[in-house]
Image (cartoon, rainbow, N blue to C red):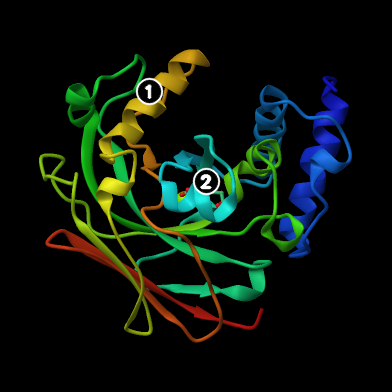
Amino acid sequence: MSNVMDLTTLATQLDQATLRQEAAAQLTGQVTLDLATAYRVQAEGIRLREQRGERRVGLKLGFTSRAKMQQMGVEHLIWGELTDAMQIEEGGELDLRELIHPRVEPEIYFITRKEINSPLSLAEAGSVLEGVGPALEIIDSRYRDFRFTLEDVVADNCSSAKFVVGALQSPQRAIDNLGVVMNFNGRALQVGSTAAILGHPLRALVQIASLLHQQERTLPAGSVILAGAATAAEALYPRLHVSVDISGFGRTAFHTRGEL
Ligand code: OOG
Ligand code: MG
């Protein structure tokens, strides 16, 4: 399972699922897929998006909290790519007709100020940042019933679908233990703490720097990084106002339209 044609065939299945809003079968039910190959399928899927004119804008981490690992049954940190087409405007509208079975989760995001081209310690992590802020990630697994193995979810670009970010704050702000509340139409549905993200959200940056280094890659200044959800995800439905409130720090929101 290593020639380019096979990778393209697998990536195309997931890409078509995205474009047609139709869930697909797990790849691991069709071929033997190791983790390294799964990341190559992911890269091929991003190449297909770039061919359609999408531009890479950053990276996301997944399974950085116990709440998410437990919800999805995957106990391994994963990473995926973000493109410009995934970003929705703050306060904007998410059309559910573009998605399969979307869920939303509260996160912290970073914008980098410098290229990341070497490993970083926790103490160094803040120094590469332009800022930090609250975010909501909309995930939409391309697999039936939102079920997958580690290799499947990696090949599927870690369920990435859309994201919305709030106002950028100074990277000096303390973000290690802030209350996080995610609301649906004003009602708190998920409550947690930023400490749920690897004990400290800045550790997401440490992980990204280490993964980039292992892959001999760099990340340009001005990139977006999603640190991973602080709580479990919630299924979206029409006519919702979704917000995340991070105590004493900031908030962001969007609303949903359309039918599922
Ligand atoms: C995979 C993506 C996980 C997170 O923040 O932990 C993720 C999924 O749950 O479908 O984005
Ligand atoms: Mg996430």
Pointer 1 local density, CA inside 10 Å: few below 14, some 14–19, many at least 20? many
User: Would residue 43 appear left or right of 257 to someone viewing this image?
Assistant: right
Kind of residue sitting beneath label 2 = Thr
* Mark 2 to mark 1 CA distance (whole Å): 19 Å
Number of marks in the image? 2
Identify whether 18 is placed above or below 50: below
Q: Quadrant of residue 51?
A: top right
Q: Quadrant of residue 33?
A: top right
Q: Which residue is mark 2?
A: 83
First-in-chain label (2 vs 1): 2
User: Would residue 63 appear left or right of 150 to someone viewing this image?
Assistant: left
- In the image, what residue occupies the spot 28% across and 41% down? 201
Q: Quadrant of the C terminus?
A: bottom right
Residue 160 shows up from this direction = no
Q: Considering the numbered disc 1 on the image, is that residue within a helix, a strand or a loop? A: helix
Estimate the x, y position of residue 103 in percent, counting from the top left.
54, 65
Identify the mark at residue 135; answer none if there is no mark: none
Estimate the x, y position of residue 3 in percent, counting from the top left.
85, 20
Estimate the x, y position of residue 99 in percent, counting from the top left.
65, 67
Pointer 2 local density, CA inside 10 Å: few below 14, some 14–19, many at least 20? many
Q: Quadrant of the N terminus?
A: top right
Estimate the x, y position of residue 163 in percent, counting from the top left.
45, 57
Identify whether 229 is placed above or below 218: below
Q: Which residue is mark 1?
A: 209
- Check mark 1 vs ligand 1: CB closer than 8 Å? yes or no: no
Residue 47 shows up from this direction = yes
- In the image, what residue occupies the spot 34% across and 16% down? 119
